[in-house]
Amino acid sequence: MSGLSPNPPTPILLNDLQWLTAYLTVHSLSDASKVYSYILWIAIGVILLVYSIVHRLGLKGGYIGALWSKWALRRRTWRKKHALAMAVKKREPHKQPKSLPSNAQILSLTALVVGSLALAYIGPDYLAPGTQIWNVGKAPSAKRATTYDPALFLPFQAKYTIPKAWWSTAARTGQIAFALFPLCILLALKTPPFAVFSISFLTDIHFDKLSFLHRWCGMLIWFITTLHVISWSVQLSQDQRKGRVLYTYAWQYQKFIFGWTAYGILTLIMICSIPPIRKRHYEMFYFLHILLIPPTLVLAALHHPPVWWWCWGALAGWAAERLYRFFWFLHTNGAFGGVQYSQKPAKLQKKSSFKRSKSQSEVLQMHTLNVGDANSGHDPAQKQSIPYPSASSVHRIVIHDEGYVPPPGFVHAELLPGRTVRLRIVPRGFVSWAPGQHFLINIPAVAWCTTHPFTAASICDAATTTDAGREILFLVRAKKGWTKHLWDTVAIMGAHNHKLPLGESIPANARLPPRGVLMRGFVDGPFGSSTRASWGTYPSVLLVAGGSGVSFTLSVLQYLCLCIAGRDGRELGARSGGWGKPNFKTTRVRFVWLIREFGHIQWCASALRKCLAILPSPELQIDIFVTNMKPAQRIPRSPQVLDQKIQDIDDEAPFA
């Protein structure tokens, strides 16, 4: 055993390229050594299976599940006590402490990093051919320490196990990096069935929850690849041929150049992915990401063909999902023709077929928005009584109907207070979405080649007979970048009384909006993990939103109001459920919205009024808090001035 070398000898050959081919072939892992890659994917499969079983059986709904959710969702802060201490001492202005990822994200990331590094370094690197992982100790082991077919030199590979060497460690880290490629791609995909994690009967977790792991998995691949490059560099610097280090010969080897090129492109991708660069130049980051990923995978595959199936598998999954999304995009936007909608309303439960809670009555006093006006002749303090609608009439109420419905394929854009743009679009093809899901929007008049994600603030109502039931509503807060361009485009068009951008026209049977502008628009989606939520599981539901984040909670609010009134959730894009159906327990909803100015109420006042019309108080409670309201500043006056002011008021009074 002691005579076995961790560096197997290379056959003597006169040609430099042929000798280098033989050297790299001899210094490559055996088929038995690939077992570490298989262990990685076995572990991933087991975790996926266990999590899917827990999700499908609803085990997270019990006491233990509640404790787990409470711990998993908690987000800790970084240096909170230090920031508060500095604010108290007034050494620096108070800043909100940075929020760390949730405990579940940290746990998942730790498991991924620790597991990958353990599989890259623990245990012998090179296993003797034919050796199995559970009987490694029975095989002999060494002491620790272009035109040529590599298969010709395979007989010269070591027939014994090599625990550690620079070249074996380099080969093993490269093997783990290859095995992580498909996982990184799977975490980035958005559309099932290619996005395995988002399949409904499995975990049903979409990219909005997996993007964190996708970014860190990419960083992990780069880090392990860097270790691979460093280890091989050390090995090639130690070994010599004809008095020269092997690094000088390696550049004659084509696969070596492929490897360095792939590593350089991967490094460029990582630099563009750094948060400050990604946030400031998102379009550049996105285009480079899409453009450089395929050549990286191809060059990595050509670099080491014995394990290139990891790269081809990752590339095939990415290309197939992109192709599927392309055809789905064409279908959603009417490239294959519009959808024929049934004119028959959906069958709903009769009013007498479900029991109403004791607190409900036919006529209830309820909170209203803008009900009662001083100029209308009615007492503003007097609240109107609105009858509680029966389930058989709820299908006639379209929550998000603003009176004007844009023609299919066009975006109706309106400017609202708080530099917010309200977008409403009716897709030309059929598309259904669940409450809380988001779409990718493309408006050629703003930017013809980019799409941006926004959460739908409306619900899909398949029972309506008009286009208003499938209208998608977005609330876009103008900040910078694309959202600022959108605001400027709508503002300029409105200032010049243009209802349509130059070069665009609407169908002959369509009409222009009374306010706002029309622009051709396209949507891609829906996406988002909200499909896995069972909104009717609990008797009471509390929805809390801040600012433009109301888009998510507003769609959920509308969905719950209709379900409690007797509608079936399956007709609204979500799971089957509603009043009188099994496992639907919700009887009360509270909606809390924090905004900075009173004018922001206009964003969704119409939808809130209609929710109140469907579900009166106390079943629905809406609380809106304005956080930036400043009371009128009072100027201190002297007692003489105040006495004179009071005297003036008395003199002007109509009575003594």
Image (tube, rainbow, N blue to C red):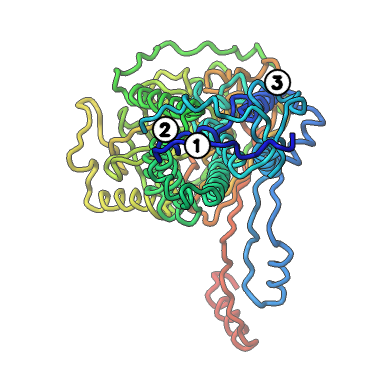
Cβ–Cβ under 8 Å for marks 2 and 1? no
Which residue was labeled with disc 1?
Answer: 24
Would you say 255 lies left or right of 538 here?
A: left
Residue at x-position 25% and y-position 28%:
510
Between discs 2 and 3, the one toward the N terminus = 3
Give the number of the mark in front: 1 or 3.
Answer: 1
Tell me the SS state at disc 2: helix
Which residue position is annotated with label 2? 302
Residue sitting at x 26%, y 36% = 512
Looking at the picture, how far across and down is residue 326, in whole percent?
A: 36, 26
Rendering coords of residue 395 (x, y %):
50, 20
From where the camera sits, is residue 561 visible? no
At label 1, counting other C-alpha atoms closer than 10 Å, the crowd grade (few under 14, some 14-19, many 20 or more) is some
Neighbours of disc 3 within 10 Å: few (<14), some (14-19), many (20+): some
User: Is there a contact, CB below 8 Å, between mark 2 and mark 3?
Assistant: no
Q: Say what secondary structure mark 3 lies in.
A: helix
The x and y percentages for residue 466 are 38, 21
Disc 1 marks a residue whose amino acid type is: Leu
The kind of residue on which mark 2 rests is Leu
405 to the left or right of 361:
left
Q: Nearer the viewer, mark 2 or mark 1?
A: 1
CA–CA distance in space, label 1 to label 3:
45 Å
**Foreground residue among 207 and 350:** 207
- Residue at screen point 23% across, 41% down: 500
| Residue under label 3 | 53
Which circle's residue, 2 or 1, is located before the other in the chain? 1
Residue 626: quarter of image: bottom right
Which mark is on residue 335? Answer: none
Dot 2 alpha-carbon crowd within 10 angstroms: few under 14, some 14 to 19, many 20 or more: some
Asked whether residue 129 appears in the rendered view, the answer is yes
- Furthest toward the right, the residue is 63
